[in-house]
Image: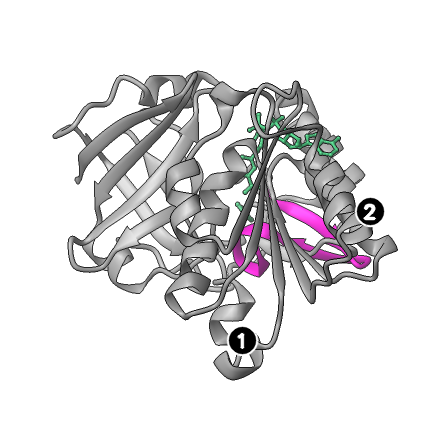
């Protein structure tokens, strides 16, 4: 069992939890995710690791209560426990393996949309801990839905907040801020990392392509096993078939087929759609043995 040591409601339907998970906390890196399971009946829910404390042996997850399973998770309190937490899954962000001196010469722009602030945070924090300032844009629908602002402020070089309705920060979507930083302020970036809803990542990638700005996105398609076997998280990247759980979750945003990924996501929600996909794509995939499960 994986004990919950802290629960915090960050905004309407958005919750943060610290979970005791010794082995995951010891080895996880920014960019990776876990799959949590509440109990025997529980669905397996993939969630990006939002933070980790190697000393306290905890990991932090942030989730939005959108469907049946995530709504069930909202009743969990401190001292309750998850039956299963599997991870760390997926590949760490590329920069973790890059030469630090080379990385220090680069200017990185992070773009976080809504709940996407949670997976962006450990990356920005990693840069901060390695003495590198980054620019961070956080976009949300309204002021009430801006999450982790204080935490982000502590680790970001420059933080730009924008809301769709203008109730906080500037008014408009994240793409407006990117335009203003690059076109009006003349800032130059070597890389953009955009994480948020699929539609946001699509439009950020379309925009950064115009600027020739390499862009990494983190895909969160529906996942089932998280080990490359079930095929649920299949995406097309640069005409190649990839599985977000083992090949990602981070990919080159300029190569991702977002329209297909969004269509697939919708289809997978219905049994009928799942059957259609199974007929088209086949049954299971070959396990690549990289799941790194906690158990
Ligand atoms: P949201 O719909 O409130 O959007 C957040 C921000 O993204 C907006 O404020 C806006 O600035 C930007 N945005 C949205 N649509 C855009 C567009 N068409 N063009 C440019 N910018 C746009 O976000 P939310 O409600 O927090 O999103 C929830 C979704 O995000 C869920 O589907 C969830 O699965 C997904 N999500 C993805 C990740 C990931 O790792 N990729 C992480 C957390 C949540
Ligand atoms: Fe990726 Fe099953 S969740 S292949």
Foreground pick, 197 / 39: 197
* Disc 2 and disc 1 in contact, CB within 8 angstroms: no
Left/right placement of residue 22 relative to residue 108 reads left
- Residue 283: horizontal and vertical position, in percent? 63, 44
Residue 257 visible, this angle: no
Does the magenta segment cover residue 239? Answer: yes
Residue under circle 2?
206
Left/right placement of residue 249 relative to residue 237 reads left
Instruction: Classify residue 216 by image quadrant.
Output: bottom right
Residue that extends furthest to the left in the rendered view of this protein: 79
**Which image quarter is the N terminus in?**
top left
Residue under circle 1?
104
Cβ of mark 1 under 8 Å from ligand 1: the answer is no
How does the figure colour the protein chain or chains?
Answer: one colour
Q: Nearer the viewer, mark 2 or mark 1?
A: 1
Q: Residue at x 12, y 30 (%)?
A: 79
Residue that extends furthest to the right in the rendered view of this protein: 210
- What crowding class fits label 2: few (fewer than 14 Cα within 10 Å), some (14-19), or many (20 or more)? some
Q: Residue at x 43, y 16 (%)?
A: 12
Above or below 158: residue 78: above
If the picture is divided into quarters, which one holds ligand 1? Answer: top right
Q: Which residues are magenta?
A: 233-248
């Amino acid at each position: 069992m994986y004990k919950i040591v802290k629960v915090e409601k960050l905004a309407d339907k958005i919750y943060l939890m610290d979970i005791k998970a010794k082995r995951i906390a010891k080895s996880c890196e920014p960019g990776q995710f876990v799959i949590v399971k509440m109990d025997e009946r529980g669905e397996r829910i993939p969630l990006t690791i939002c933070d980790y404390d190697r000393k306290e042996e905890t990991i932090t997850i942030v989730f939005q209560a959108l469907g049946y399973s995530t709504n069930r998770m909202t009743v969990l309190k401190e001292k309750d426990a998850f039956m299963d937490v599997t991870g760390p899954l997926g590949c760490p962000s590329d920069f973790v393996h890059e030469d630090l001196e080379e990385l220090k010469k680069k200017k990185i722009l992070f773009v976080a949309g809504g709940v996407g602030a949670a997976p962006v945070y450990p990356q920005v924090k990693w840069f901060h801990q390695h003495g590198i300032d980054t620019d961070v844009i956080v976009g949300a629908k309204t002021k009430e839905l801006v999450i982790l602002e204080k935490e982000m402020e502590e680790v970001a070089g420059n933080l730009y907040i924008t809301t769709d309705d203008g109730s906080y920060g500037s008014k408009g979507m994240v793409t407006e801020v990117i335009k203003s930083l690059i076109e009006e302020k003349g800032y130059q970036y070597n890389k953009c990392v955009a994480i948020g809803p699929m539609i946001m990542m699509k439009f950020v990638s379309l925009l950064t392509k115009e600027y020739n700005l390499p862009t990494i996105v983190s895909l969160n398609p529906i996942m089932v096993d998280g080990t490359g076997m079930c095929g649920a998280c299949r995406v097309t990247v640069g005409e190649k078939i990839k599985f977000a759980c083992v090949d990602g979750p981070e990919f080159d945003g300029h190569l991702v087929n977002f329209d297909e990924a969004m269509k697939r996501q919708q289809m997978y929600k219905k049994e009928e759609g799942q059957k259609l996909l199974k007929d088209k794509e086949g049954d299971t995939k070959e396990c690549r043995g990289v799941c790194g499960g906690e158990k």
